[in-house]
Image: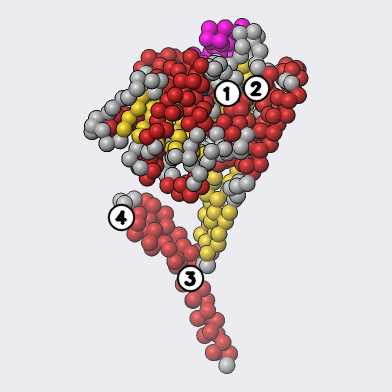
């Protein structure tokens, strides 16, 4: 069953049932970027340089990669206040509203400590507490991302992480974009550092004279950033790896072609490696969406990026029916899934794998990107099969505790010993047996004392 590409337009069109379709669709699903050995070599060198030379290496690499000559890495309070003051009132209000909505959403379900007690003297549970210090990475380069500041920092702020540290690349003049500083202020960030790339990840992971070592690093970034996070994992915690952004639209006959095309372009304009996929069983919709893509590209500010993204990873799949559309969508496991249908809420039950699902015709991905409430830091590259959106859980840790009193250990101890012997760990069993022996001695002593007391009472009679 092979692939059939039709029309020669800005996207590839595949039809389910054609020869080679399965092979072509499986290739689309396996879209995780190949790990470039050259990237690995560069990133390892950067990490080792930062570990050995600290601030000096970070400053040197910032000049090399970002073109900024800095005296200090940290944004001081006066610079931060000045940046915030530059943000127009309307933009300040919009950023504040976004932070408020994201905060309210994440406050709805904060895990709490809990405990349980069992008859016989067992006491156990979980203590939940915030991480002491977290680092959030906010990319720069081709765009500014104040929304990423909000999405990464607000959940940490909600659970009262004591110190939230942000790293983001500076402009060539050494400044940080005012909107990013404003977002950091409303999101609850405590400290901001002018550093990007793998060097920023290394500084956060290992600490330098001026950059504090964090417990966990979250946030998206390019291949160098993601590879650096992968290499420092274990030294610090990280969130799921963030690859290029992606959207998959499942559309039926009620969909508006122009709106579907706009949703595809809204993600394609992010970067050349972004993925935009439409799956529909409505044949006339294919041509109409292709036509709308071509029309809307003409007026798009980031048309060059979006066009290249569609050329590389733009796909329209003509499925056999609506059920097959969702079967294919679940195989793809998209970061963003749009259900362009009048029956979107009913169809939600068909979704097994997706980062966030956007229901109906009036819910573009953009509302989720900015201020709906759910986090926009989502699993990509098919990892929605097993990863979840960033949330408050990512900034918490759980410590389990357990206490057994003698009656409970007497009740369960023999089973513990049996299981230990089953695995060949006799030392485990011995640690229980020694305690059981004392419990048995104490019990015999109590019984002997009662017998002696009873005998004494008989003589008194």
| Badge nearest the viewer, 3 or 1 | 1
Q: Earlier in the sequence, mark 3 or mark 2?
A: 2
| Badge nearest the viewer, 3 or 2 | 2
User: Residue placed at 33% from the left, 40% from the top?
Assistant: 320
Circle 3 residue:
443
Query: Does residue 324 appear left or right of residue 226 in this picture?
Result: left
| Badge nearest the viewer, 1 or 4 | 1
Helix, strand or loop for the magenta stretch, by majority: helix
Circle 1 residue:
138
Q: Judge by depth and name the residue closer to the eye, 119 or 416.
A: 119
User: Residue placed at 28% from the left, 27% from the top?
Assistant: 4
Q: Mark 3–mark 1 contact, CB under 8 Å?
A: no
Q: Percent from the top left, x then y, of residue 62?
A: 56, 11
Q: Percent from the top left, x then y, of residue 375?
A: 57, 36
Distance of mark 3 from mark 2, alpha carbons?
68 Å
Circle 4 residue:
422
Is residue 355 among the parts visible in the rendering? Answer: no
The quadrant the N terminus occupies is top left
Element assignment for label 2: helix
Q: Mark 2–mark 4 contact, CB under 8 Å?
A: no
Q: Mark 1–mark 2 contact, CB under 8 Å?
A: yes
Query: Does residue 76 appear left or right of residue 377 in this picture?
Result: right
Which region of the structure is painted magenta? 49-69
Distance of mark 2 from mark 4, alpha carbons?
58 Å
Quick check: is 248 in the magenta stretch? no
The quadrant the C terminus occupies is bottom right
Element assignment for label 4: helix
Q: Earlier in the sequence, mark 4 or mark 3?
A: 4
Circle 2 residue:
180
């Amino acid at each position: 069953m092979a692939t059939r590409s039709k029309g020669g337009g800005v996207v590839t069109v595949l039809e389910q049932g054609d020869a080679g379709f399965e092979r072509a669709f499986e290739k689309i699903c396996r879209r995780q970027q190949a790990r470039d050995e050259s990237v690995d070599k560069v990133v390892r060198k950067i990490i080792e340089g930062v570990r050995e030379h600290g601030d000096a290496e970070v400053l040197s690499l910032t000049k090399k990669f970002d073109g900024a000559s800095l005296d200090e890495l940290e944004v001081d309070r006066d610079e931060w206040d000045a940046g915030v003051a530059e943000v127009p009132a309307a933009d300040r209000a919009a950023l504040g509203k976004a932070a408020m909505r994201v905060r309210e959403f994440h406050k709805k379900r904060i895990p709490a400590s809990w405990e349980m007690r069992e008859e016989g003297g067992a006491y156990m549970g979980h203590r939940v507490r915030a991480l002491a210090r977290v680092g959030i990475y906010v990319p720069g380069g081709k765009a500014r991302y104040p929304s990423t500041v909000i999405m990464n920092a607000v959940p940490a702020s909600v659970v009262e992480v004591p110190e939230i540290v942000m790293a983001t690349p500076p402009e060539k003049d050494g400044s940080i974009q005012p909107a990013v500083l404003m977002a950091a202020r409303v999101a609850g960030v405590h400290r901001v550092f002018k550093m990007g790339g793998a060097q920023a990840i290394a500084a956060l992971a290992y600490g330098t004279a001026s950059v504090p070592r964090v417990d966990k690093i979250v946030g998206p970034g390019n291949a160098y950033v993601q590879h650096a996070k992968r290499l420092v994992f274990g030294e610090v915690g990280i969130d799921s790896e963030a690859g290029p952004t992606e959207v998959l639209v499942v559309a039926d006959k009620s969909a508006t072609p122009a709106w579907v095309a706009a949703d595809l372009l809204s993600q394609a304009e992010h970067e050349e490696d972004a993925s935009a996929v439409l799956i529909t069983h409505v044949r006339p919709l294919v041509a109409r969406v292709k036509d709308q893509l071509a029309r809307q590209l003409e007026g798009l500010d980031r048309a060059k990026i979006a066009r290249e993204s569609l050329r590389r990873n733009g796909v329209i799949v003509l499925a056999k029916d609506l059920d097959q559309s969702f079967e294919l969508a679940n195989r793809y496991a998209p970061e963003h899934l749009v259900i362009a249908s009048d029956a979107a809420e009913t169809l939600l039950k068909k979704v097994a794998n997706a980062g966030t699902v956007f229901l109906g015709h009036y819910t573009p991905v953009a509302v989720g990107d900015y201020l709906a409430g759910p986090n926009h830091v989502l699993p990509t590259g098919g990892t929605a099969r097993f990863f979840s959106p960033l949330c408050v859980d990512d900034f918490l840790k759980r410590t389990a505790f357990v206490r057994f009193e003698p009656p409970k250990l007497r009740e369960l101890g023999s089973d513990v010993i049996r299981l230990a012997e089953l695995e060949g760990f006799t030392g485990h069993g011995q640690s229980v047996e020694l305690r059981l022996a004392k419990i048995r001695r104490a019990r015999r002593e109590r019984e002997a004392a009662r017998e002696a007391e009873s005998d004494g009472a008989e003589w008194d009679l």
